[in-house]
Amino acid sequence: MRIKFVNILLLLMLETVFYLYSDTYFAFFLLLFTGLLLFVSFVYLFLVKGKMRITVDTAKAAYKREAMPIKLQIDNRSFLPVVKAVCHIHMYNRLTGEAENERIAFSILPKYQRQVKLHFTSHYSGYIQMEVEAITFYDMFGLFSYTENIHASTSFYILPNAYHMNVKVSDEVSKINENLDRWINMVGLGQEYFNLKTYVPGDNVKQIHWKLSSKLNDIILKENSATVSESYLVLFETTYQNDMKRPKPKVIDAMLEVHLSISKALIERGKMVSVGWQSRRGEPLHVVQASSFAELQQLYPRLLEIEWLKSDETVLEAFAKQGREDFSCIIYITTDERAERDGLLSTDMNLYVVTALDEAKIENIVEGDMAFVPKRINGNIYELSG
């Protein structure tokens, strides 16, 4: 624009010099005509001001690396054409914190509606908030511009993938339950003795189930508060320390997909699965049971709208404060910084920590650790180690 402005000034100076030295009507009308064009071009911007309407239409969701069609419906209500205009579009992924700005140029005839088709592709899942913030109008020569705020917005989801994953986790309660289920099915007792636990010193010996203990070769107590069937809680860490940076988008995306893949694998094996997360500051920890993959998919919007928070308290610590002990196993998806902080809690819970590691730290994995490195190799997102 500056170059054009300089060129026009030079043109006006040359025409002025030409008129002064030639003193002809031709030079006078040439200078007058150029000045009128510039004046009309300047006034033109104010004539199209406030005459533009834009609406945004998108599909509700698309998977990662799929093109999301976006339609900008532009309505020019002015009697003048728009020679050149630029839409300023802001895209924000609430889950990963990514922000992106786009500029879309267009022109439109007077009293006309036009549809501009765009395609948005994201490498990471999340909840995308899209807003056409403003339109910049340019005059016929590109010398002057005027920006008008629009604030036409929409939102959509970029869906994660749930991969096939082999999950092998067990604990003492689960082993007892498996033996008990096998024995009950064999002798045909039905479901009458499902509230049982192993004996520990200090328990009331009057509650010992002697017949069942002899069959299982272990001392079993009847207790109403204990659970027999395996129940899993898959926790998704959604906070980061105040003195640390938010995890990278590829790490957040990978953590979510590992969280969903593990949950899906357990559901397909017929386990009782609940998923837990914390979505916004001030909200309590969310723990929701998903008895099928369809129910897990229904939770996608809530998971994708999570806003990562700066907090000194991890999701696992928030869960521990609730004092809930109705899960036989907890699988905790976290970052390496948070895993170090929560190391002390693992001694008090039947806890499996699955850590997201940066490639530079992959050498820190020791035998027995469970970790994954967000990676793209021939379309495979994860390199699982452990």
Image: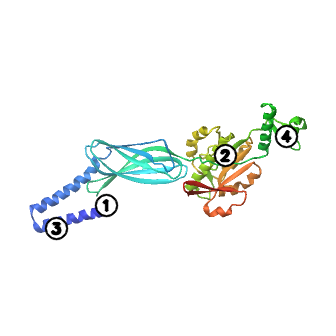
Residue type beneath disc 3: Val
Q: Earlier in the sequence, mark 3 or mark 4?
A: 3
Residue type beneath disc 1: Met
Quarter of the figure with residue 4: bottom left
Separation of disc 1 and disc 2 at Cα? 56 Å
Q: Earlier in the sequence, mark 1 or mark 4?
A: 1
Separation of disc 1 and disc 3 at Cα? 24 Å
Visible residue check, residue 46: yes
The tag on residue 17 is 3
Visible residue check, residue 276: no
Left or right of residue 321: residue 381: left
Residue type beneath disc 4: Leu
Separation of disc 4 and disc 2 at Cα? 30 Å
Q: Earlier in the sequence, mark 4 or mark 2?
A: 4
Q: Are marks 1 and 2 in contact (CB under 8 Å)?
A: no
Separation of disc 1 and disc 4 at Cα? 85 Å
Q: Which residue is mark 4?
A: 216
Q: How many marks?
A: 4
Element at badge 1?
A: loop
Q: Which residue is mark 1?
A: 1
